[in-house]
Amino acid sequence: MRIDVVTIFPEYLEPLNVSLVGKARARGQLLVEVHNLRDWTHDRHNTVDDTPYGGGPGMVMKPDPWGEALDRVEARGRADERTATADPVLVVPAPSGRPFTQALAVELSEKPWLVFAPARYEGIDRRVIDEYAGRWEVHEVSIGDYVLAGGEAAVLVITEAVARLLPGVLGNAESHRDDSFAPGAMADLLEGPVYTKPPEWRGRGIPEVLLSGHHGRIARWRRDEAFRRTAAHRPDLIERCDPAALDKHDRAV
Ligand SMILES: COc1ccc2nc(C(=O)O)sc2c1
């Protein structure tokens, strides 16, 4: 997978050099290029924003730098043999976007090339999204119902959620199966509690079932704990569970 990010804060994307995403880049499983939007400005002050038509507070990101930047990113991607025949998918983090979910992470992880356009200020001139929607797949995505100052934090969240789904990135392929929100039986359940050594810590032991070596009982206990945690923290998800899929999950373990 190739990921391009166009931003006025390239340094904000430094976390993509470490941990899971950093290792995937080092192994060549993921190519990430971060571009400074200001490289496509031509005035002395490298201006990327201007006042909104129709008045109102704040500033709007100008279309010209974005158009030049995205065209250049497309040209560079097409010059890369790994994406020469692919079409970029534009991902625009925005408070007005569709909620980012594990299902969308799975959908995006199957694309060969993502181009992120995180906004700042009051957002990007709408004509930019309209221009690229004419020839690229475009997703406007929100990572949550709260106010951020820009889209770069969303890029970090989306990139990590997508990268961990790429083949070979997570050591244990099974790890995906019981993820919270993983498609299938666990699609709408939160993961239950986890434990590791030592067997006793500050007078607290381990649930006996986890020491039993009985895989069927352990799986059922984990499923029940997931139900318990979901009912406590996200009751809204319980009615979305598919009892048939859960039953199949139980029978499979
Ligand atoms: C101005 O650019 C913004 C502002 C807020 C914001 N919030 C997001 C979210 O995903 O919640 S993306 C995003 C972009």
Image: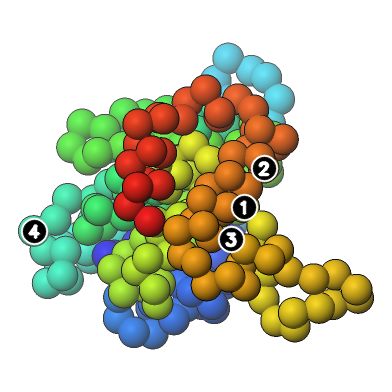
User: Looking at the image, which residue sits at the far right?
Assistant: 202
Tell me the crowding category of disc 2: few under 14, some 14 to 19, or many 20 or more residues within 10 angstroms, Cα based. Answer: some
**Residue 70 at x, y = what percent?**
32, 51
Q: Is residue 23 left or right of residue 67?
A: right
Marks 1 and 2 in Cβ contact (< 8 Å) = yes
Mark 3 or mark 2: whose residue is earlier in sequence: 3
Residue carrying label 4: 85
Residue kind at label 1, given as amino acid type:
Gly
Instruction: Look at the numbered disc 4 and give the secondary structure of its residue.
Output: loop
Residue carrying label 3: 9
Mark 3 or mark 1: whose residue is earlier in sequence: 3
What's the distance in space between the residues labelled 3 and 2, CA to CA? Answer: 38 Å
Colour treatment of the image: rainbow
Q: Looking at the image, is 27 positioned above or below residue 140? A: below
Residue kind at label 3, given as amino acid type:
Phe
Residue kind at label 4, given as amino acid type:
Thr
Residue at 18% over, 37% down:
135
User: Where, quadrant-wise, is the C terminus in this rendering?
Assistant: bottom left
Tell me the crowding category of disc 3: few under 14, some 14 to 19, or many 20 or more residues within 10 angstroms, Cα based. Answer: some
Residue carrying label 2: 229
Q: Is residue 203 left or right of residue 224?
A: right
Marks 3 and 1 in Cβ contact (< 8 Å) = no
